[in-house]
Amino acid sequence: MQANDVRVLKGAAVPTLVVGLLAALVAVFTTGAKGALGAGIGLVLVAAFFTVGLVVVSWAGRVSPMAMMAAAVLGYVVKVLAIMAMLKAFEDTTAFDSRVFALSVIACTLAWTIGEMRGFMKLKMLYVEPEAKVPGQGRG
């Protein structure tokens, strides 16, 4: 990963972790251990989903800037299919509170998105590469 990508990842992951831990803390007092487990699973799911997406797009950008969009779309499709499979597998589970899980996923997704937007806005990235000036060459 490039340094800019790491900054964006940190800017998104830290608020998401805080929100997820707060969700688990609230859940343990309101719905018990099953609620806290649901909130924790939601936090892990959101963090994994978005981290994989950022890493894949970052890797594709290093390989070929033209491949970034294809990698983003393919990565998104694979992640959606994986989440659908996971939700189907836990459809009738009683191991954790599914309502707290869903609320945790929503809250963590919002935290990640806001943190990522804030991270991108704070970056000092050049959108156009300036022309390299060669010393000793005058304007001709």
Image (cartoon, helix red, strand yellow):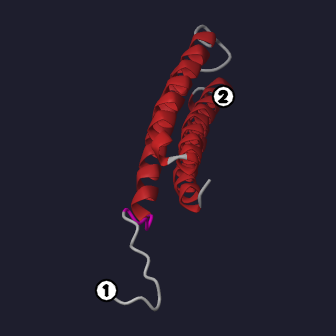
Residue numbers of the magenta segment:
123-127
The spot of residue 94 in percent (x, y) is 65, 12
21 drawn magenta: no
Residue at image position (64%, 20%) is: 96
> Which numbered disc flags the more N-terminal residue, 1 or 2?
2
**Label disc, if present, on residue 37 of the rendered structure:** 2
Mark 2 residue element = helix
- Going by the numbered disc 1, the residue's amino acid type is Gly
Q: Relative to 125, is 16 on the left or the right?
A: right
Residue at the far front in the pictured view? 140
Q: Is residue 29 visible?
A: no
The residue nearer to you, when weighing 19 against 9, is: 9
Label 1–label 2 contact, CB within 8 A: no
The residue nearer to you, when weighing 138 against 72, is: 138
The residue nearer to you, when weighing 55 against 45, is: 55
Mark 1 residue element = loop
Density class for disc 1 (Cα within 10 Å; few <14, some 14-19, many ≥20) is: few
- Going by the numbered disc 2, the residue's amino acid type is Leu
Residue at image position (59%, 21%) is: 82
The spot of residue 129 in percent (x, y) is 40, 67
Residue named by callout 1 = 140
